[in-house]
Image: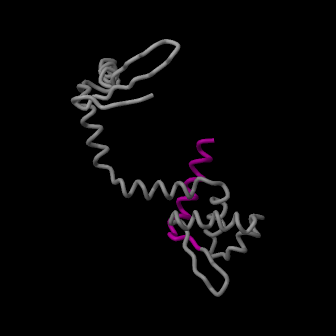
């Protein structure tokens, strides 16, 4: 599917389907039909687009990127287990490796992602590296996440 912007900020989507030919649908027409259905109130499609674009421009993009990074760090079962372990107190990387029965490269990979995501921090003591939650509120977030997951199941 390709899209291109036309005059007056109207987008046109062109679907090429070799079997049935060329179909053209404008976003404006779709929004008009949506407005006519009564599902979005009585505003005009152009007003609705303007309002939605204003809301998008008001978003804190830097903050959202940081949240994206955090959720990326949280998006793996092994990393969640590591966070649960570290949430109980600071651990050496070798303790994480032994507790989860992981190889050293796998452990380092996951700890690195968690550290780059800002979820954990580390300190070196000689050749040992110890990890802890970067923010104590993360433990509460994990607990709330578990509660939501149980309620949704």
Residue 140 in the image: state x and y as whole percent. Answer: 54, 62
Give residue 42's quadrant in the image.
top left
Which residue sits at x=37%, y=30%? 3
Q: Outermost residue, top direction?
A: 20
Which residue sits at x=63%, y=59%? 80
Q: Main secondary structure of the magenta part?
A: helix
**Which quadrant is home to the N terminus?**
top left
Give residue 50's quadrant in the image.
top left
Q: Nearer the viewer, residue 41 or 91?
A: 91
Residue 131 in the image: state x and y as whole percent. Answer: 61, 74
Q: Outermost residue, front direction?
A: 18
Viewed as shown, does residue 143 lie left or right of 3? Answer: right
**Which quadrant is home to the C terminus?**
top right
Residue 46 in the image: state x and y as whole percent. Answer: 23, 28
- Which residues fall within the magenta stretch? 132-153
Judge whether residue 27 is colored magenta.
no
Judge whether residue 140 is colored magenta.
yes
């Amino acid at each position: 599917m390709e899209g291109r912007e036309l005059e007056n900020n109207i987008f046109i989507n062109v679907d090429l389907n070799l079997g049935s030919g060329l179909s053209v649908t404008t976003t404006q027409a779709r929004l008009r039909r949506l407005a006519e259905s009564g599902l979005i109130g009585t505003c005009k499609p152009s007003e609705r687009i303007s309002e939605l674009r204003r809301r998008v421009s008001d978003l804190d993009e830097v903050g959202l990127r940081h949240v994206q990074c955090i959720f990326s760090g949280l998006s793996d079962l092994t990393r969640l287990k590591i966070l649960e372990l570290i949430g109980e107190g600071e651990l050496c990387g070798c303790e994480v490796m032994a507790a989860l029965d992981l190889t050293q490269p796998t452990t380092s990979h996951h700890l690195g992602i968690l550290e780059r995501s800002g979820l954990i921090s580390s300190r070196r003591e000689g050749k040992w590296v110890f990890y802890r939650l970067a923010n104590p509120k993360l433990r509460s977030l994990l607990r709330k996440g578990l509660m939501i997951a149980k309620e949704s199941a």
